């Protein structure tokens, strides 16, 4: 326990020294994959900040680069083939991207943790859940097995796993999907990290269990005052929990705004399309309108706006010039569209349209 | 657990009956008369022939012969050769030679095969990987007698690193070279299987989780990846032990090791049915026991298929 306290006080001192810096800051992140000699641009300039106790949702469809970006922030990308070509990732002001691996590793799981979509494949099938949770304490804190086990039981109770003590020796496949995801959460939160990245944490679960897991995450977040980056493609999951939403498209930010604002007055045609394609309970709606076409191939991105080929509003400028992120309306609402102001202004009309 | 073992042992009974009967029937079907063969050119008096045929149950139909043989087997009697020796005596000395040879080959497969496989699997696409892939392909492609004679001449005779033939130096020295030759084929498969399995498991989700937990690469590979990767390899190694025991005829011949393989080969030529069937029966037993052991070990390695 001794080195732990030392380390904690050191971290605290550091935090004070870096006062004013946001908890997590991702700036202009670019990730490229080299696949058979071709460059695949998975992330092209992602920026967001996360404050203590805040939840930022990164919303995007499959292939939008959201998972790759998360792994880049964690530092667990396979390099090669992946390569972070530009950008910065700062944790309380400390740049993580240039850090030597030895040092970076000590941050993973300790100060910044991650949970994954499918807990059955993300947990090691041949070790008991107790083994896998205890490993966190043993590796990072140098705890002995007996003490680690006591902590693991405590933790499993905290994520509300019934009869935790008896289940310590069970294997992942002996748990239900929801319980398995709780184990993942317990493991990720073992060392009370400052930041938790949840990559589609509820996608593999059925709807009632989804709600339980999201509530659990929200409760734990309140208790631990940690920042939560919630990566998802599910607008329904985001609505209840996110403070701010970053909409990703083709590896870049299409729009970012406080959650309520984004739902009420989207300023990017892609966000408008997303909202029109899901059923809503708060107003009468007509038939759901899918977004036409498919996302662009990240190995051959079109010039100009990446959404232009699918955009109902596209004009000549859209295929020539890449739109910058510009502020619309309230502070913190920004969209990368040449016509952001107009889309934003037409907010109420757009909603009227979907009433059809 | 015990129920599982009991059930597996019960399942082994029909397998045992089926295989021994097949072998018995095949030896029965061999052309020629073993009794006449005993006497060579000079014909035996009909009374003697008849007495001998009666003694060895050769006048009975196949099924009756087989049942009588089984009856003896259950009392621990493997039968008698046509020149009056007990089959168990003929086989006992040979048995230890083959077991020592198979064990040497098997250890060789286990240690070197898995070692090469891990080495290559961790460095896919590298020079090491290419060497292992190329080398194992070569070994698989070359017939075992070519490999055997080459090893014997180069390593044994020219360089004098190993005894050339025979068993005078005992285990392990006399068995090293033949063990390597016998095990080389299995070693190649083990290396390739391990390589693929490691490379596949390194891409698994739980490996990504292990890195996200802040573990060192050594721990991620050595603890999390290796155990999962070895599950299919252990299965192969188990089954292969049975094959090594039975498939050593050529290697035993090259290195002049008086093992089961050579004995069976000679006995087939002499139509010594009881010896062939006896040796095969023992091999079947070894095979069944090893398979059971592998299934149990499999459960230890992979909790998902563990029997409670």
Image: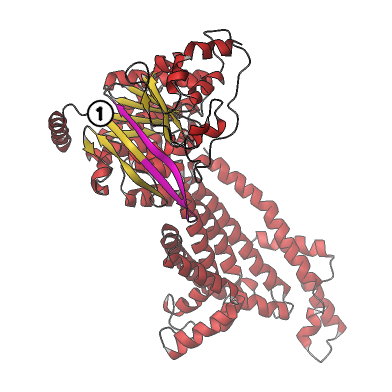
Mark 1 lies on residue: A23
Residue displayed at 31% across by 44% down: B215
- Looking at the picture, tell me which residue is in the foreground, B204 or A305: A305
**Magenta span:** A30-50
Q: Position of residue A50 (x, y in %)?
A: 30, 26
| Badge 1: residue crowd in 10 Å (few <14, some 14–19, many ≥20) | many
Identify the main secondary structure in magenta. strand
Q: Position of residue A99 (x, y in %)?
A: 24, 45
| Magenta stretch encompasses residue B55 | no
Q: Numbered disc 1: what chain? A: A
Q: Position of residue B158 (x, y in %)?
A: 44, 90
Quarter in which the N terminus of chain A is drawn: top left
Q: Is residue B112 visible?
A: yes
Task: Please tell me whether residue A248 is drawn above or below residue A225 in the rendered image.
Answer: below
Tell me the element at label 1.
loop
Q: Position of residue B60 (x, y in %)?
A: 84, 67
């Amino acid at each position: 326990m001794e080195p732990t306290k030392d380390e904690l006080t050191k971290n605290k001192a550091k935090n004070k020294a870096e006062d004013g810096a946001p908890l997590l800051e991702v700036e202009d992140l670019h990730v490229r994959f080299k696949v058979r000699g071709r460059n695949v641009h998975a992330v092209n300039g992602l920026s967001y900040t996360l404050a203590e106790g805040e939840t930022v949702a990164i919303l995007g469809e499959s292939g939008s680069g959201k998972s790759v970006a998360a792994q880049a922030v964690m530092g667990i990308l396979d390099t090669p083939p992946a390569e972070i070509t530009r950008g910065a990732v700062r944790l309380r002001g400390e740049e993580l991207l240039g850090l030597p691996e030895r040092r970076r590793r000590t941050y993973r799981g300790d100060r910044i943790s991650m949970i994954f979509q499918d807990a059955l494949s993300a947990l090691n099938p041949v070790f008991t859940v107790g083994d896998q949770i205890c490993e966190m304490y043993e590796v990072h804190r140098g705890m002995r097995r007996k003490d680690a086990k006591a902590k693991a039981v405590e933790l499993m109770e905290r994520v509300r796993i019934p009869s935790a003590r008896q289940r310590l020796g069970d294997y992942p496949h002996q748990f239900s999907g929801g319980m398995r995801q709780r184990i993942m959460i317990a493991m990720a939160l073992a060392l009370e990290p400052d930041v938790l990245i949840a990559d589609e944490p509820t996608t593999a679960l059925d709807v009632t269990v989804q709600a339980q897991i999201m509530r659990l995450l929200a409760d734990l977040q309140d208790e631990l005052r940690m920042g939560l980056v919630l990566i998802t493609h599910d607008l329904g999951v985001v609505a209840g929990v996110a403070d701010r939403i970053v909409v990703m498209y083709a590896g870049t930010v299409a729009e970012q705004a406080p959650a309520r604002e984004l739902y009420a007055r989207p300023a990017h045609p892609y966000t408008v399309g997303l909202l029109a394609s899901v059923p809503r309970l708060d107003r009468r709606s007509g038939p759901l309108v899918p977004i036409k076409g498919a996302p662009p191939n990240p190995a051959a991105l079109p010039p100009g706006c990446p959404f232009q080929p699918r955009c109902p509003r596209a004009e000549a400028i859209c295929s020539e010039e890449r739109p910058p992120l510009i502020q619309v309306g309230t502070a913190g609402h920004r969209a990368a569209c040449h016509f952001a102001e107009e889309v934003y202004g037409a907010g109420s009309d757009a909603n009227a349209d979907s009433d059809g | 657990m015990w129920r599982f073992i009991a059930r597996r042992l019960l399942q082994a009974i029909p397998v045992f009956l089926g295989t021994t009967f097949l072998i018995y029937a095949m030896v029965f079907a061999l052309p020629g008369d073993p009794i006449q063969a005993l006497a060579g050119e000079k014909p035996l008096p009909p009374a003697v022939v008849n007495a001998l045929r009666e003694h060895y149950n050769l006048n009975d139909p196949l099924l009756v012969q087989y049942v009588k043989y089984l009856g003896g087997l259950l009392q621990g009697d493997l039968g008698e050769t046509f020149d009056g020796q007990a089959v168990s005596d003929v086989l006992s000395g040979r048995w230890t030679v083959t077991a020592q040879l198979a064990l040497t080959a098997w250890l060789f497969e286990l240690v070197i095969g898995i070692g090469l496989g891990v080495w290559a699997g961790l460095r896919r696409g590298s020079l090491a990987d290419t060497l292992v892939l190329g080398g194992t392909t070569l070994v698989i492609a070359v017939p075992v007698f070519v490999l055997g004679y080459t090893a014997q001449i180069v390593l044994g005779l020219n360089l004098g690193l190993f005894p050339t033939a025979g068993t005078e130096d005992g285990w392990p020295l006399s068995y090293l070279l033949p063990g390597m030759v016998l095990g080389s084929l299995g070693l190649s498969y083990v290396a390739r299987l391990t390589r693929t399995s490691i490379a596949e498991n390194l891409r698994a989700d739980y490996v990504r989780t292990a890195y996200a937990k802040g573990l060192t690469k050594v721990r991620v590979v050595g603890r999390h990846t290796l155990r999962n990767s070895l599950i299919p390899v252990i299965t192969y190694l188990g089954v292969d032990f049975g094959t090594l025991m039975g498939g050593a005829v050529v290697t035993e011949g090259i290195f002049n090791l008086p093992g089961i393989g050579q004995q069976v080969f000679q006995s087939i030529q002499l139509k010594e049915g009881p010896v062939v069937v006896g040796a095969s029966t023992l091999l079947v037993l070894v095979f069944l026991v090893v398979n059971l052991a592998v299934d149990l070990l499999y459960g230890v390695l992979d909790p998902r298929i563990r029997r409670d």
